[in-house]
Amino acid sequence: MSAPATSVRVPRYAAALDFNALWQEFPPAPDYFEGPYQRSRDELHAIQDERFLRQMERAWQVPFYRKHWSAAGMQPGDIRSLDDLRRIPPFSVHDLRVELQEEPFWADYIGIDPAADAPMPLIVQTSGGTTGLPRPMIFTPRDREVMNIITGRRLFMQGVRPYDLVQVALSMGLTNGGVLAREGIWKYTGAIPVMTGSGAQTPTRRQIELMRAWKVKHLIGFPAYLKHMGLVARDELGIEPRSLGIKSLIVHLGVDDRGALEELWSADVYDTYGCNECGTMAAECGHKSAMHVFEDAFVMEVNDLETLQPKAQGERGVVFITTLFKHAAPMIRYNMNDVTSWAEGTCACGTHQRGITKIYGRSDNMVKLRGVNVFPEAIGAVISAEPRCNGEYVCVLEGTPGGREDITVMAEARDGSVDAAGLAAELALRLKEALGVKLNVQVVKGGALDPMTGLSQTSKIKRLIDRRSKGAA
Ligand SMILES: [Zn+2]
């Protein structure tokens, strides 16, 4: 038997990057807070402009953009500065799905050709994949390291310090959430990630026992799961979550009730905005006044859903993102389908970077019901504000034979003493007031919705179940 071939070129991660140069360009915490974080708008614009033109050059090498942009009559060099950004046609997840039908892994938007390009250490993470196969996103060492640096900055901003234990209740699987948190914590904060994962990986009771025994300081997870965890501690284990010494809950908050979660754990809740394709894009600082966009790595737009024109401060629109650092699958005017608004005023932390208020919901999850735009997340906000409910809910969308569409909101009662019919009628009135459209409401007993939402088993909780016939959808 002969020895293994030595002529094969095997790429090594640490040799694939000049870390010192990278840290100059994208400073990790704490250097970042004396660098780009403090820059004026003009200085930030200059950094963005230069990085944007380089990102455009790279994007022209990616078959997906060559195809789309050429079809729109664009030529390399047409875009001369960031001020031309709006001349570039946007794209969305639907365009990525079309590419994946032809090639489910090395899709045209990735821009790497294993037959021609020198090997490099790559990793893949995917979307949740609720319909069909999940969407792969491949990261080169530099892409990944910038995302790790930004994760570290975000956590530092939210109080994570060396030797802190950070419990991550997100699964370590195909999706990015848990994996990226681990890399960012471990490499760029000096804190120690405790990867408990979702309730399916480490049962909720065990998560709480660990947290108490190891003196965990921060929790990362979905708000609904962290709330569930707090209630299990209090109601099933007789452990008061406030006594556990948790300092911060780091979540994608959206329209969930920050006050209730802070009260339950006696901890600060920090909102964060990120996605599988790009990692963290914006996050709140200790003042919780807005999610500051990491503008040395991203250009964010908030545009009207229909006209695609930019929205003024305070007006709701959909997020478009342009990355300033990606080699594999650069994102140029990617329509995220997330609805937000620019925050008004400045933050006491002194940054000049623009901030967004919160994510109100997904425009593709939004249901148009009798002319009114309804977000399941807004329904959730009404349900969580009701003390006789435990906050769990699911919306069932159905089409009636007459062609009319209806939403039935199912909400769990806090305990057996609640008058379900009376409460349902009250909630229906409140939802009508809040949303401007009438919904059916059913109040059910605690835990009854678990099989529908997947609350105790997955970290991706379902809030909208579409039972319309395929043709109507
Ligand atoms: Zn701030």
Image (cartoon, rainbow, N blue to C red):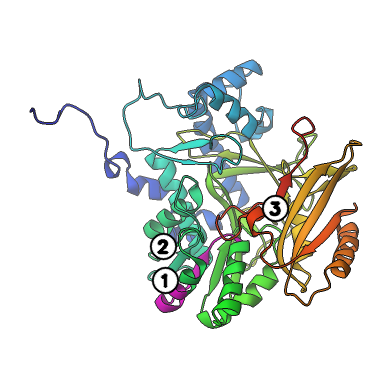
Q: Quadrant of residue 383?
A: bottom right
Q: Name the N-terminal-most of marks 2 and 1.
A: 1
The dot on residue 463 is 3
Name the kind of residue labelled 3 in the image. Arg
Residue at (77% x, 35% y) in the render: 469
Quadrant position of the N terminus in the picture = top left
Disc 1 secondary structure class:
loop
Residue labelled with disc 1: 164
Tag nearer the camera, 2 or 1: 1
Disc 2 secondary structure class:
loop
Determine whether 253 is above or below 90 in the image. below
Magenta residues span: 209-222
Q: Quadrant of residue 243?
A: bottom right
The dot on residue 189 is 2
Is residue 216 on the magenta stretch? yes
Residue 115: image x %, image y %?
35, 20
Determine whether 148 is above or below 332 in the image. below
